Amino acid sequence: WIAGGQLGWLLGGATIAATNTSAGTFIGTIGVVHEVGWSFAWVALSR
């Protein structure tokens, strides 16, 4: 396992949060909402 299984829950959660909220996510979501419409915004917010 990564870090020999010694990665704490706080650091692990922060790592997952940082990955899910990367710059590509923000830019991509804005682009999709622009193309598809505001109905996609609910999908993005539900994640």
Image (spheres, helix red, strand yellow):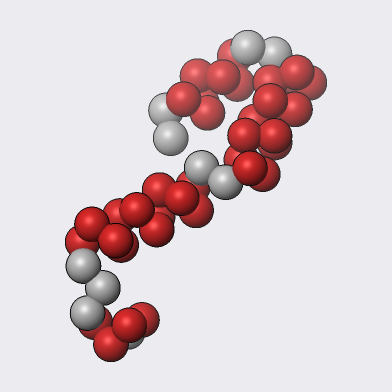
Q: Position of residue 14 (x, y in %)?
A: 34, 53
Q: Is 33 left, or right, of 41 in this rendering?
A: right
Q: Position of residue 2 (x, y in %)?
A: 36, 81
Q: In the rendered view of the protein, which quadrant contains the N terminus?
A: bottom left
Q: Nearer the viewer, residue 16 or 35?
A: 16
Q: In the rendered view of the protein, which quadrant contains the C terminus?
A: top left
Q: Residue at x 62, y 34 (%)?
A: 26
Q: Position of residue 39 (x, y in %)?
A: 59, 14
Query: Is residue 37 depicted above or below 47 in this figure?
Result: above
Q: Position of residue 11 (x, y in %)?
A: 29, 61
Q: Is 12 left, or right, of 25 in this rendering?
A: left
Query: Is residue 47 depicted above or below 20 in this figure?
Result: above
User: Residue at the right extreme?
Assistant: 35
Q: Residue at x 78, y 21 (%)?
A: 35
Q: Quadrant of residue 27?
A: top right
Query: Is residue 39 depicted above or below 10 in this figure?
Result: above
Q: Residue at x 60, y 21 (%)?
A: 40
Query: Is residue 21 depicted above or below 39 in this figure?
Result: below
